[in-house]
Image (cartoon, rainbow, N blue to C red):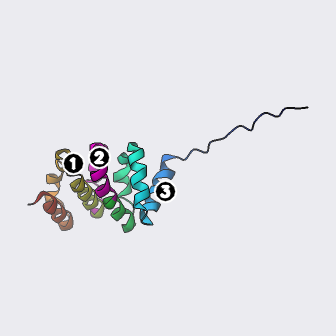
């Protein structure tokens, strides 16, 4: 009687790029609750927030704002992990990306998140300036 060895299990690893795309797609479909659960379970995803805001789909960017409104309630202590990625997008060539990044920083609302925003009061885009004024109460 021959004994066969158990099949070796091959894990199919999902790359960060693929996962980022899945997160964006879920946000675009309105499945924010799923993404809230993912971000609460795996805080490292917070670092990807700025990159999510570069997605051309408005529903993705809106989903990021809704995501952060939930995260501010449920795990505000972790949100500083998103700040570097968001600050990096404040100098993005597209004004809509700068505005979205400023908006999410405003949702986070901590001193650390708000600190870079005054620099955008002289932005070339009147919309970005208006967003920042609204956030800062100017």
Where residue 91 appears, as percent x and y from the top left, is 26, 53
Quickly name the residue at label 2.
79
**Tag on residue 86?**
none
4 in relation to 16, above or below: above
Q: Secondary structure at mark 3?
A: helix
Residue receiving disc 1: 113
Q: Is residue 107 left or right of residue 20?
A: left
Disc 1/disc 3 C-alpha distance (Å) = 26 Å
Q: Nearer the viewer, residue 6 or 80?
A: 6
Asked which secondary structure carries label 1, the reply is helix
In this picture, which residue range is highlighted in magenta? 67-95
Of helix, strand and loop, which mostly describes the magenta segment?
A: helix
Marks 1 and 2, Cα distance to the nearest angstrom? 9 Å
Quick one: label 1 or label 2, which is nearer the N terminus? 2
- Look at the numbered discs 2 and 3 and tell me whether their residues touch, using CB distance below 8 Å: no
Q: Residue at x 18, y 49 (%)?
A: 116
Closer to viewer: mark 1 or mark 2: 2
Which of these two is toward me, 23 or 71? 71
- Dot 3 corresponds to which residue? 22
Q: In front: 59, or 54?
A: 59
């Amino acid at each position: 009687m021959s004994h066969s060895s158990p099949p070796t299990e091959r894990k199919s690893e999902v790359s960060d790029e693929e996962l980022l795309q899945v997160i964006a797609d879920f946000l675009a479909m309105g499945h924010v609750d799923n993404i809230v659960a993912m971000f609460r379970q795996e805080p490292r995803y917070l670092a990807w927030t700025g990159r999510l805001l570069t997605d051309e789909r408005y529903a993705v960017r809106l989903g990021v704002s809704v995501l952060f409104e939930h995260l501010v309630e449920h795990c505000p202590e972790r949100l500083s992990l998103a700040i570097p990625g968001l600050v990096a997008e404040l100098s993005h060539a597209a004004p809509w990306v700068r505005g979205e990044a400023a908006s999410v920083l405003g949702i986070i609302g901590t001193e650390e998140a708000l600190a870079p925003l005054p620099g955008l009061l002289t932005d070339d885009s009147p919309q970005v300036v208006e967003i920042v004024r609204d956030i800062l109460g100017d």
